[in-house]
């Protein structure tokens, strides 16, 4: 039987879970941007509210790290995981804000590839939210990081096809510049989800 001298401090797992649940809220809000007659300003403002809540969760996590004598696993890994979850939320908020500020949702339609990227992010967010509570037992996590990495590859493909579309001559130069910035944030969010999954893998390997 394996004994552990680390405590099963539930507060850390709860904070990771809350942060991941906010990512699901974020991708659900981005999906709203594809709906007809959507109030883009409302979506952008709600994304900002979720991002602020995520910042508060991250601050709570850092405070908890500094006030806990023995942590459930390495402090550096706890800090990194919390920071990476926050990074994902920052990219999601940026997507919504840029779409609103640049007025891109006034186009007849956003590129299909952009919606495909949001769909990939939505799947990654749900996978991540399902995985975070399992950190407590460190069981049944391998499928999560494998699938999250596979989805990141799907996101890369959608991103490349989006760039092809943007530079096809379908859009004017200014619109291309605006949409390229949004595309970069979407791709960065996909990468950030992968970084979260890779960190979970590292933690699981250390603790196994």
Image (cartoon, rainbow, N blue to C red):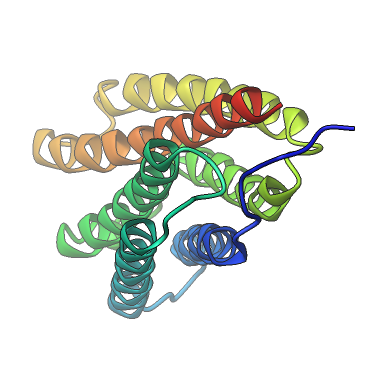
- The answer to whether residue 110 is seen in the rendering is no
**Quarter-of-image position of residue 164:** top left
Question: Toward the viewer: 189 or 58?
Answer: 58
Q: Residue at x 68, y 24 (%)?
A: 146
Task: Give the mark count.
Answer: 0
| Vertical order, 160 against 184 (above or below) | above
Question: Toward the viewer: 35 or 9?
Answer: 9
Q: Is residue 135 left or right of residue 177?
A: right
- The answer to whether residue 30 is seen in the rendering is yes
Q: Looking at the figure, which quarter contains the N terminus?
A: top right
| Vertical order, 34 against 169 (above or below) | below
Q: Is residue 84 left or right of residue 100?
A: right
Q: How far across and how far down the image is residue 139, in percent?
A: 79, 38
Q: Residue at x 28, y 31 (%)?
A: 170
**Quarter-of-image position of residue 144:** top right
Question: Toward the viewer: 93 or 166?
Answer: 93
Q: Residue at x 27, y 43 (%)?
A: 182
Query: Going by the picture, which residue comes out furthest to the left?
Result: 174
Q: How far across and how far down the image is residue 183, in percent?
A: 31, 36
Q: How far across and how far down the image is residue 53, in percent?
A: 36, 74
Q: How far across and how far down the image is residue 177, in percent?
A: 13, 36
Q: Looking at the figure, which quarter contains the C terminus?
A: top right
């Amino acid at each position: 039987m394996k004994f552990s001298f680390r405590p099963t401090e539930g507060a850390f797992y709860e904070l990771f879970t809350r942060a991941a649940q906010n990512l699901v809220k974020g991708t659900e809000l981005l999906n709203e941007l594809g709906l007809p007659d959507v109030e883009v300003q409302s979506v952008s403002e709600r994304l900002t509210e979720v991002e602020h809540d995520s910042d508060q969760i991250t601050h709570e996590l850092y405070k908890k790290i500094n006030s806990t004598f023995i942590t459930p696993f390495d402090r550096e890994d706890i800090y990194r995981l919390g920071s990476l979850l926050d990074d994902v939320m920052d990219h999601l908020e940026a997507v919504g804000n840029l779409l609103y500020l640049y007025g891109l949702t006034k186009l007849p339609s956003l590129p299909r590839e952009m919606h495909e990227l949001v769909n990939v992010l939505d799947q990654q967010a749900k996978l991540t939210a399902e995985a975070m509570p399992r950190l407590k037992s460190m069981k049944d996590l391998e499928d999560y990081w494998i699938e999250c990495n596979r989805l990141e590859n799907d996101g890369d493909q959608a991103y490349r096809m989006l760039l092809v579309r943007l530079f096809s001559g379908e859009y004017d130069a200014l619109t291309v510049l605006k949409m390229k910035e949004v595309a970069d944030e979407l791709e960065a969010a996909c990468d950030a989800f992968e970084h979260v999954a890779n960190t979970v893998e590292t933690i699981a390997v250390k603790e196994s």
